[in-house]
Amino acid sequence: MHLRWLIFYLASVGSASAAGNCSYKALIEHLGLGNNDDIQMTSLRPVFKWKTPTFVYTDLFVTSITEVDEKAQILSTQVTIVHGWFSEFTKWDPDDFCGIKFCPIKKDMVWTRKVAETGFHIEVFKAIVHPKMKHGVSSGRPRRSSSHPLNAPIHIKTEFATKENQYVQLLNQGAIVTSNTFAVTTACKMNLHQFPFDVQSCTFSFQSPIHSIEELIISPFSGASFLTLSSKQAFQTQGEWEFLSINMSKANASTLGVLQDQLIYKITMKRRPLLYVINFLMPVFYFLILDLASFFIDSSGGEKLGFKITLLLAISVLLLLLQDMLPSTSSDIPLIGVYCVVIFTLIGISVLETILVNFLMAKGNQTAAVRPTESSSALSDAVKDTKGPPDSVTDRHEEQLYVLDVLKQILVEFQAAATHQNQQERKSLSWTRVATIIDVIFYFLYVTTVIVFLITLFKAWFLRVPGSQSGAVSPAPPEHFPGSLKSRSGYSIPV
């Protein structure tokens, strides 16, 4: 009888204990997370032996490209950063807690990963946020990372889309996962040589500001193809820039003689050039075609020269617009600048050629007309003298001889005038012929130069060699890392 009561009592106590372990509170108390003053849990790396390194796994997703300022070399994006690491102090058996496999807690209750993004200097981890940051906007002065192996750009400003996530997700295997979304405004060195058909790449680097490579190792959790596909699916904007890919590489950085692990993400994006082609490239090309067609305008008037000067002024206005779009500190001249300057120069040379042809034509039209006025007056005088009454036969004979002499003189003068006029006409025809030859030869040279230039520019713009993908890392998470982490709450990309 007493044995039955004992068995009933033990079963009741066991049921009450099992029912009490079904709450998150019981799990947190079991893990020893209720005391925020526990230095081991909140301030020290979660390892039993200090020589054991802590592995931090990182994923970066690009959800939008909000703005790209070419003149200021600034990139504004919205990114989602997911971190996961292991704690040897937060493991439990789900069977002891009614099947609880993951538990959300405040990040202040556990050790948080000491990793900083140095490529764009978003400082998202504990004890790294700038002390002057208010309402999610950093007011600190620009500074440059001294440990960046690629000469990281100056830290301009970091803006947060929302407040930093205050919770982390605990998994029963000991993994801790957190996710944060940021609106990032950062400096990015851009090569605008192929503008507007350019492809830009910006780097985001992760490294620990305090832990050496023996203490903390940063590795990518997902592959580049998964990050690229997930970012494209979560992309929220359809603007001027098209997101292409995310690639990653590993490097080591040295800070005060301490070697630290570093993970570098490279974001590649491509400009959509249709707007620039319609509003800029096509008008300049049309001006060039009109200049070629202007060679068929009659050169006798001034319409041809005025038309060419109008085209020259129109291209100069487009050059002023181009100056506002491109930075003045570019190391090499963008191809669009070469395109406009060369066409401007060709049209300028065409204007000079038109001026020369017009000058030769005008010179050929200046012919000297010689009129035998004196001969005509002499002839009229001789005719008047013959009308008088003859005095004698001798006088009449002398008068006839005089008239013959005058006629001979007039004939000589007419022959000289005709010869001079023929010479003037031949000279005029020679100047016109030279102007025509120059115009035809220049036209063929002009067309040939335009074709060669456009073919060369087309090759430089579109037949570029694609950049290599060397240095990419194919992550291989350890076997003890939970494979179902991607489906866990807190890992999915917030849209």
Image: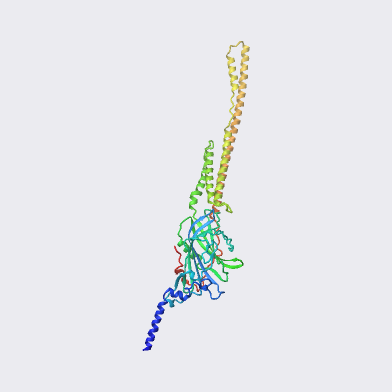
Residue at the limit of the structure toward the front, as seen here:
37
Q: Is residue 106 above or below residue 427?
A: below
Among the 4 quarters of the image, the one containing residue 429: top right
Q: Most extreme residue toward the top, as rendered?
A: 391
- Residue 156 found in image quarter: bottom right
Return the residue nearer the eye: 394 or 345.
Answer: 345
The residue at the point 58 percent across, 36 percent down is 359
Could you say where residue 6 lies in the image, as x and y percent from the top left? 39, 86
Q: Position of residue 329 (x, y in %)?
A: 58, 53
Above or below for 1 versus 129: below
Return the residue nearer the eye: 450 or 81.
Answer: 81
**In the orientation shown, which residue stands out farthest toward the bottom?**
1
Residue 192 against residue 472 in the figure, above or below: above
Total numbered labels placed on residues in the image: 0
Q: Is residue 84 visible?
A: yes
Report x, y in % for residue 404.
Answer: 61, 19
Q: How is the image coloured?
A: rainbow
Is any part of residue 183 visible from this angle?
A: no
Q: Is residue 458 above or below residue 356?
A: below
Determine the image quadrant of residue 146: bottom right
Residue nearest the observer in this picture, 3 or 81: 3
Residue 303 at what x, y percent from top left?
Answer: 52, 38
Placement of the C terminus among the 4 image quadrants:
bottom left
Specify whether 1 is left or right of 165: left
Instruction: Kindly give the residue lying farthest to the left in the view shown.
Output: 1
Quadrant position of the N terminus in the picture: bottom left
